[in-house]
Amino acid sequence: MDLMGEFIGAEQVPRSGTVERCGSQSTLLNLMGKFAIAEFARQIGESNMVYDYEWFKQKIYGLTEIDLGSYKERQMKRRIESLMRKNGYNDYEGYVDLVKDDQEKMEEFVRHITINVSEFYRNPNQWKVVEEKILPHLMEKRGRRLRIWSSACSNGEEPYTMIMMLHQKYPTILPYVELIATDVDRQALKKAKEGVYQERSLKNLPEDVKKRFFERVDGHSYQITDEVKSHVSFRWNNLLEDGYPDRIDLVLCRNVLIYFTEEAKRQIYQQFSEAQPMDGVLFIGSTEQIVQCEKYGYHSLGSFFYVKK
Ligand SMILES: C[S@@+](CC[C@H](N)C(=O)[O-])C[C@H]1O[C@@H](n2cnc3c(N)ncnc32)[C@H](O)[C@@H]1O
């Protein structure tokens, strides 16, 4: 089966070009330079909000290893400043003092900036494509020992959706599938491992799936079964800083790239490409699109899916 022919608008484009990688070392150097300017400005009493934000980013990087410089600035500042106000602060310095000594406030901060809204079978039509086209393609080209990576898995809805689908549609390959699920938010990973969900995040699930894979805990929450959980290996990983797992046949990276700067996105696409074998597939979110995907060795399969060539 030729997956390319299965999608409208798929075209053969030769692979060309590379993208410069910016690893954590250059991130750190970049931040340190700006931090020095901000610190100097503060000392001579020339502090303003721009310098303060540089200073704040450096402090947050030291505390969380999250480089705010790779997230879209206007959006991120708005979110941070609204959280600061909620906590009674209107200066970065006071707020940093708060979070550095208070674990709960630190977790609140990370949770607030990472935005972990998710749901099971989010965008059901796209999951239909995974079921009917992507998985058959991967099984044909890569065999049944598939390695799948949910790279910003939030509270676990996305990787668990994948396991439920495999369970229902391709049960014979499920024992051979390896599913790694990662996120930068430790609280989200904790929740994913617990596997307890509110009714609203199950809204796309057909009744039989709900019955088969969930047990009601109380009036409003459901626990996913241990059987589903046992197929997912959750780990902490920062897409902007850390190494990526290798030989990944299917990468899911949905609804997170929208928060990153163009430079950060380029770095991530390049790293995904390096992590994928020939015929591997990258699945991205509804509002996302890889401009000039051939630069990274991908061919577009219409919207949301890219195959490595
Ligand atoms: C809106 S959720 C998307 C969840 C799921 N992929 C979906 O589409 O429903 C975005 C997730 O990206 C994670 N995230 C943000 N920055 C990240 C980073 N640098 N590395 C890894 N995950 C990150 C957040 O913690 C959050 O759980």
Image (spheres, grey):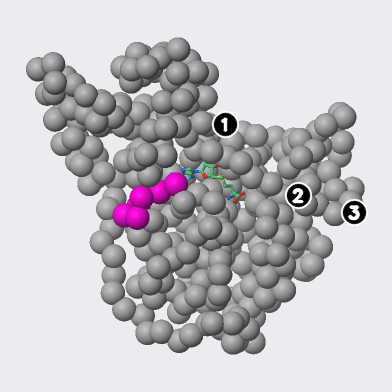
- Identity of the amino acid at label 2? Val
In which quadrant is the C terminus drawn? bottom left
Q: Which residue sits at x=37%, y=63%?
A: 270
- Identity of the amino acid at label 3? Asp
- Determine contact: label 1, label 3, CB under 8 Å: no
Above-or-below relation of 202 to 44: below
Label 2 or label 3, whichever comes before in sequence order: 3
Q: Secondary structure at mark 1?
A: helix
Q: Magenta segment, which residues?
A: 259-264
Q: Residue 303 is drawn in which quadrant? A: bottom right
Between residues 195 and 114, which one lies in front from this camera angle?
114
Q: Residues within 10 Å of mark 1 (few under 14, many from 20)?
A: some
Above-or-below relation of 78 to 212: above
Label 1 or label 2, whichever comes before in sequence order: 1
- Identity of the amino acid at label 1? Gln
Disc 1 target residue: 187
- Determine contact: label 1, label 2, CB under 8 Å: no
Label 1 or label 3, whichever comes before in sequence order: 1
Above-or-below relation of 142 to 152: below
Q: Secondary structure at mark 2?
A: helix
Above-or-below relation of 166 to 302: above
Query: Residue 66 in the image: x percent, y percent?
Result: 38, 37
Disc 2 target residue: 228
Disc 3 target residue: 208
Q: Which residue sits at x=55%, y=55%?
A: 254
